Amino acid sequence: MRLQYLEAMGIDVWIPKTSVITQQTSFPEGIADNILPKSTDNWETLQAEVVQCTQCDLCKTRTQSVFGSGNKNADWMIVGEAPGQNEDQQGLPFVGNAGLLLTEMLRATGLDREQVFITNIVKCRPPDNREPKSTEVDTCKAYLLRQQALIEPKIILALGHVAAQTLLNTDEPIATLRGKIHALNDTPVVVTYHPAYLLRSLLDKRKAWADLKFAMQIVKNHNK
């Protein structure tokens, strides 16, 4: 296993114990305001809009927007909260310590970053890495839905409570949302912890691994 980064940090839990996941057998009804854009959309147009976006005040403090990166035909779409300082400087999602952990989490499932598409709920860094405001989330959500429509992923992995609650239009906590199949425009959604949280809360790493295995099984079933 290519888990040198985890081992260097003293993280040794990616050989999981047996975990119990309660799986729903059917997807919940679609969310009314998650309307997919018209099929005439394309990556070039969408990315240009994100780069130039001035629809909320985050454009005043960002270095650059962070559109997302990875495979535009990916089976997995991974959605975090917002860019941090490193992401704001480099224009790429998950490039700091949390990003390194995410990379190794994916490798533990047999996936490379180039095989998935990684993005965030909001595309610009909030000042001082604060949580995005509801107005910022509402403004930016349309970009995410357009990315989903273009990718047509087989699964969406929501990292952290902001991503999960935004995608699912809920205020339920992570503990309630984990271990279930949710849906966003008929795409299954699995909720897990944000890698930045896992760096601080090592006891929840096994739970995150269980979530990844759960997501892997959903994709495997889809491919049958």
Image (cartoon, rainbow, N blue to C red):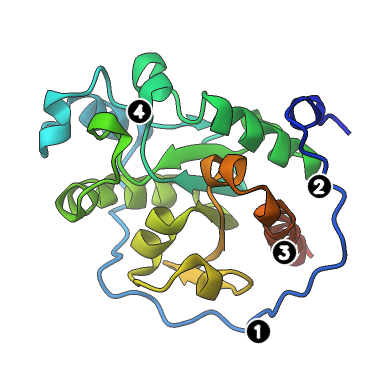
* Amino acid marked by disc 1: Thr
| Callout 4 touching callout 2 (CB < 8 Å) | no
Q: Residues within 10 Å of mark 4 (few under 14, many from 20)?
A: many
CA distance separating discs 1 and 4: 35 Å
CA distance separating discs 2 and 3: 17 Å
The image shows residue 161 at horizontal and vertical percentages of 43, 58
Sequence-first tag of 1 and 2:
2
Give the residue at mark 4.
66
Element assignment for label 3 = helix
Residue name at image x 38 percent, y 64 percent: 165
CA distance separating discs 4 and 3: 28 Å
Give the residue at mark 1.
25
Sequence-first tag of 2 and 3:
2
**Which of labels 1 and 4 is toward the front?**
4
CA distance separating discs 1 and 2: 29 Å
| Callout 1 touching callout 2 (CB < 8 Å) | no
The image shows residue 53 at horizontal and vertical percentages of 16, 31
Give the residue at mark 3.
214
Give the residue at mark 2.
13
**Which of labels 2 and 3 is toward the front?**
2
CA distance separating discs 1 and 3: 13 Å
Foreground: 24 or 195?
Answer: 195
**Which of labels 1 and 2 is toward the front?**
2
Sequence-first tag of 4 and 3:
4
| Callout 2 touching callout 3 (CB < 8 Å) | no
Residue name at image x 22 percent, y 23 percent: 62
* Amino acid marked by disc 4: Val
Q: Please state, as top left, top right, bottom left or bottom right, where the N terminus lies in the image.
A: top right
| Left-right relation of 192 to 110 | left
